[in-house]
Amino acid sequence: DAGVIQSPRHEVTEMGQEVTLRCKPISGHDYLFWYRQTMMRGLELLIYFNNNVPIDDSGMPEDRFSAKMPNASFSTLKIQPSEPRDSAVYFCASSLGSGNTEAFFGQGTRLTVV
Amino acid sequence: GDSVTQMEGPVTLSEEAFLTINCTYTATGYPSLFWYVQYPGEGLQLLLKATKADDKGSNKGFEATYRKETTSFHLEKGSVQVSDSAVYFCALAYTGFQKLVFGTGTRLLVSP
């Protein structure tokens, strides 16, 4: 398997624009996680899904952020409108479930909002 | 709530030095404990884990022992290499609940 695949790897956008980050989890994994990493706040869990259903979105910073998982092989994280303080590296991760808690991370999307 | 505390970095060592990165946790139950490593420009990857008290996780010369009495899971390596330079994250999770709780990460810099 190719691992967790995220796109794009880098995104530069202007303040106020909509940004969509994409993730393809490892096939057969039941859980999908979105994390944000910044120097100031470290690694933050934004939201996670089990079998395509959002389980905990308490980490989503505000209504400008939304995440979807329309099927088992695809998820999106959308920011609308984007702000400079959203600049960060966003990671997607997936795990098998069934008692196996090891998470496999993608390479991340570095978002810069100018 | 559950939390993980790691020592502040960066930790700067010379090649072949002994490494310890401290990690303590606060938990209401008996979680599994993990060390993840992040190399520059990459995502996190699992380094080692321990699922119950007194278990020792080990991989690539790194090891950590789950100490319930001191609520600790310190990472050690006897002789570090330049290629070990990375950020190391301690984390906990409960079996059956997939959510990982991460520490803030500790950057390790190893010089030749």
Image (cartoon, rainbow, N blue to C red):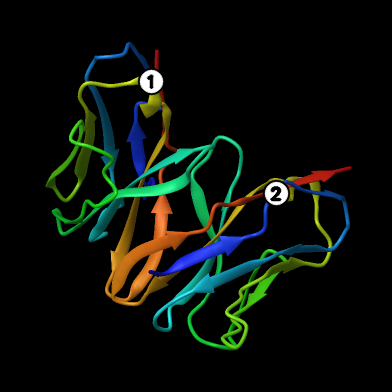
Q: Residue at x 20, y 24 (%)?
A: A80
Q: Residue at x 23, y 37 (%)?
A: A62
Is there a contact, CB below 8 Å, between mark 1 and mark 2?
no
Q: Give residue B80's quadrant in the image.
A: bottom right
Residue B29 point in image, percent of width and height? 39, 83
Q: Residue at x 24, y 52 (%)?
A: A58
Q: Give residue A68's quadrant in the image.
A: top left
Residue type at mark 2? Gly
Q: Is residue A41 left or right of residue B55?
A: left
Residue A102 point in image, percent of width and height? 41, 65
> Which chain is indicated by disc 1?
A
Q: Residue furthest front?
A: B1
Q: Is residue B66 left or right of residue A101?
A: right
Residue density around tag 1, few if under 14, some if 14–19, many if 20 or more, within 10 Å: some
Residue B55 vertical placement versus A19 (above, below): below
Q: Secondary structure at mark 1?
A: helix
Residue density around tag 2, few if under 14, some if 14–19, many if 20 or more, within 10 Å: some
State the mark number for residue B9. 2
State the mark number for residue B4. none
**Residue A28 seen in the figure:** no
Residue closest to the eye, A1 or A57: A57
Residue A77 point in image, percent of width and height? 24, 36
**Disc count in the image?**
2
> Which chain is indicated by disc 2?
B
Q: What residue did someone put label 1 on?
A: A84
Residue A44 point in image, percent of width and height? 40, 48
Residue B50 vertical placement versus A22 (above, below): below
Q: Separation of disc 1 and disc 2 at Cα?
A: 27 Å
**Residue B78 seen in the figure:** yes
Residue B101 vertical placement versus A90 (above, below): below
Q: Secondary structure at mark 2?
A: loop
